Amino acid sequence: MNSDETSFPGWFPTLAVVAVAIAFIVADPAGLASRLATHEFGLFRALHATAGVARPVDSIPAQVLFLEAIGTALVLLISLRRYAWVVGVALVSALAAQASSWLLYIHLDALFDTANASLAIVLAGITALLVEPFCDNEPRRRVTIRRRTPPAEPAGLESPAPVPTPAADALVLTSLCCSLRRAPAVGRFFEGDVAGFMRLVESVMAPLVDDAIAQGAWVSRFDGISFAAQWPAAGGAHADQACDAAGRVIAEMARANEQLALQWPRGDHPCPTLEIGIGLASGKTLAGTMRAGGRAESCLVPQDGVTAERLGFLTERYGSAAIASETTVAAVERAHAFLEVDFVALDPGAAPVRLYALLGNALVRASPKFRAVATFHQHIFQCIRSQQWEKARSLIEQCRKISGANPKLYNLHLDRIAWYEADPPPPDWDGAFRPPLR
């Protein structure tokens, strides 16, 4: 993220002090710099009375170079809000300069003025600390996660349409819908710091959209905390590309949370954990472009009832980051690790569908642990369909003991088993869960 949003940056006073100090040393209209150098030489003579005849050395170029180098370092540290380092660098630099001048005097009888530059650097560090509360208009809490940002559009060019869909047609697409879960809860940590919250969301979500576009997707929607992307069948392995993108989203969120845990202040307010919900669905979609108010927006209507956006909302129910439809799993099952998590009718009267959690790539799919969990899940759903409630409950308890188990998913099915026992399904039941109508 950028760090230049303030109208009066905190590093400006320190830069001004260094600039004035350079002018003071070079011009010295009142002879103040010369008098300070004279006092410095007098102190050196008093401390080292046995020295020979001192040879004055023109130190103005060296002082200016010293001020520019150390002043640049101070400005950089102030922009990073490393104020303890600002004071430390200023004091150490001033002491090092004075020590160098003293060594030149006692060994070479050379009078080399560093008092002026040393004083300027110390004043710059002190000034940074004194004016810091008044110079920075942003709240002190800020997030420093940095991600690449796309290049700006050249001046004078119109922005392209949000989604470059072709003429209206029925297309085979794989859609990915990604949203930041519990955004209001995260936003409460930024009360009074709206700009900080927006920077956090942008630093996390914008790179995900950039990645989808780089992999050939159409981005049909992006509202800051969620986006939808589509891969057309004409572009190749559309379902595989969408699943790969979902895997990168999950990995990126893990890295973002690691950085937040390091950057966030400890104490009474713990680091907020960012959670993502991803839905993946494939199938025929009515696609076209609509225009209203001078804007061009895509219109995408899936021909079945299973949408990526809807599956994304269901991720929290199942305790998984990504949920995929049957059609997506059928297209890429061997290239990714999918675990069946439900057989459910999403709408009253609708045909039931199987839902799968995306757990990883082909390497995860080949692991013994995944194969064991997948086998357990097959037996669990077989027992539920055959109404063997105790056996299903026993298998679920065994799954809980596997490392990395998903307790939220197993609690869901245990609650359903208890409900089935109290309200037995009809004899012709197909094993799908149908939410009761209230």
Image (cartoon, rainbow, N blue to C red):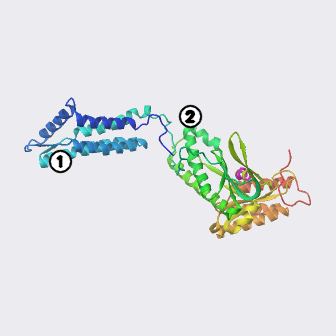
Residue placed under numbered mark 2 in the picture: 192
Q: Is residue 419 visible?
A: yes
Circle nearer the N terminus (2, 1): 1
| 205 relative to 326 in the view: left or right | left
Image location of residue 35, percent across then percent down: 18, 32
Image location of residue 435, percent across then percent down: 83, 50
Q: Identify the mark at residue 167; answer none if there is no mark.
A: none
| 433 relative to 193 in the view: left or right | right
Q: Start and end of the magenta stretch?
A: 310-315
Question: SS class of the residue under badge 2?
Answer: loop
Q: Which quadrant holds the C terminus?
A: top right
Residue placed under numbered mark 1 in the picture: 103
Q: Residue at x 73, y 68 (%)?
A: 375
- Which of the 4 image quadrants contains residue 241? bottom right
The residue sitting at the front extreme is 156
How packed mark 2 is, by other alpha carbons closer than 10 Å (few <14, some 14-19, many 20 or more), is: few
- Which of the 4 image quadrants contains residue 319? bottom right
